[in-house]
Image (cartoon, rainbow, N blue to C red):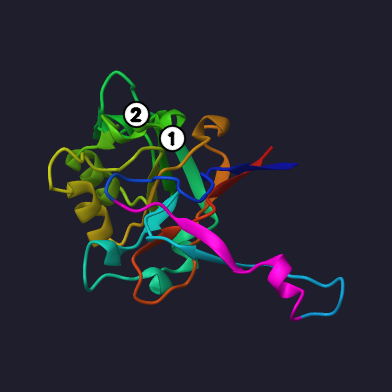
Amino acid sequence: MRRLVDLSHAVEDGILTYPGLPAPFISDYLSREAAREHYAEGTTFHIGRIEMVGNTGTYIDSPFHRYAEGKDLSELALEQVADLEGLVFQADRSSRAIGPELFSAADVRGKAVLVHAGWAEHWGTDRYFDGHPFLTAEAATWLRDSGAALVGIDSLNIDDTSTGERPVHSILLRADIPIVEHLCNLESLPDSGFKFHAVPVKVRGFSSFPVRAYAIIHS
């Protein structure tokens, strides 16, 4: 038996993902009413239009997000973002900063490392934008050196956004390790024993894009 768990927020008109970035605008390019003029009686279609930044909803960052010479979305190998053995780590909610000690007893080589900070419960509220949990530079260095394949978190940002520095993005993306932010439902996963998938659209010259992140649990 297997069970699929959705780990993504829905992208919807007007939803804010990150302070200062515009919300998506969703509209009809071809409405069903307008379609009646183009098709046989009783046959209608809907064609939607969406205007949004790549960093919307639950999204993945490719190395190009941080580095001009880094891989863009079209250059990410499927092996980097799909069918990965996954591990969930429960962050200590008494501290915003998440250090390497959370991971130090685990073998993360070749695995998707998902940090459950519990911040997704604030999604869609102003609280989500203030005081979010994040990884430290030391944690990112440990994950890089230990061979993590991908790192995700259910928080506003994997970095501390109180300063302009982004050491976690810099360390992981320099090492060709994709980052997935704004995950949700991590509480529905076991600590191990599942496959993680977070495949973006194959867009050249683009650095970040929403994903339908999900896990397959085999029991």
Left or right: residue 97 compared with residue 61: left
- Viewer-proximal residue among 141 and 72: 72
**Magenta stretch encompasses residue 95:** no
Which of the 4 image quadrants contains residue 113?
Answer: top left
Amino acid type at mark 2 = Arg
Please state, as top left, top right, bottom left or bottom right, where the N terminus lies in the image.
top right
Is residue 108 in view? Answer: no
Q: Which residue is mark 1?
A: 123
Question: Residue 125: x, y in percent?
Answer: 40, 32
Q: Which region is colored magenta? A: 21-38
Image point (75%, 79%), residue name: 37
Is residue 160 in view? Answer: yes
Question: Residue 181: x, y in percent?
Answer: 38, 46
Q: Secondary structure at mark 2?
A: helix
Q: Which residue is mark 2?
A: 127
Classify 10 Å Cα crowding around label 1: few (below 14), some (14-19), many (20 and above). many
